Image (cartoon, rainbow, N blue to C red):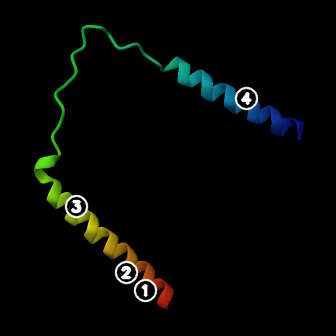
Amino acid sequence: MNSKLLSIYLTILMSLYSFVGFAQVDPPADDDPPAAPINSQLIWLSIAGILFALYAFNNKYQKIKK
């Protein structure tokens, strides 16, 4: 039990250390790129989402049916 607790502590410690170690400050002169519009093709995105949902439900129904 003691080695498992030590392993958990070390995992948490290394995770926090890597999070702090890779954090970077954004330089002040860095300009943000323009936003990418998604509303021009929104209808196609919604149709693809509906078709995928129907496909997924159909596959699940076929597996339950068998």
| 36, 7: nearer the viewer | 36
**Left or right of 64 in this view: 49:** left
Q: Nearer the viewer, mark 4 or mark 3?
A: 3
Counting from the top left corner in percent of width and height, residue 47 is at 20, 65
Which quadrant holds residue 36?
Answer: top left
Three-letter amino acid code at the position of disc 2? Asn
* Residue neighbourhood size for the residue with mark 3, other residues' Cα within 10 Å, grouped as few (<14), some (14–19), many (≥20): few
Q: Mark 1 and mark 2 in contact (Cβ < 8 Å)? A: yes
| 47, 26: nearer the viewer | 47
- First reached walking from the N terminus: tag 4 or tag 1: 4
Tell which residue pokes out farthest to the left in this image.
40
Counting from the top left corner in percent of width and height, residue 8 is at 75, 35
Give the alpha-carbon distance from disc 4 to disc 1, as whole Å: 46 Å
Q: Which mark is residue 58?
A: 2
Three-letter amino acid code at the position of disc 1? Gln
- First reached walking from the N terminus: tag 3 or tag 1: 3
Which quadrant holds residue 30?
Answer: top left
Three-letter amino acid code at the position of disc 4? Leu
- First reached walking from the N terminus: tag 2 or tag 4: 4
At mark 4, the secondary structure is helix
**Left or right of 65 in this view: 45:** left
Q: Mark 3 and mark 4 in contact (Cβ < 8 Å)? A: no
> What residue is pinned by disc 4?
10
Q: Which mark is residue 62?
A: 1
Give the alpha-carbon distance from disc 4 to disc 3, as whole Å: 45 Å
Give the alpha-carbon distance from disc 2 to disc 1, as whole Å: 6 Å
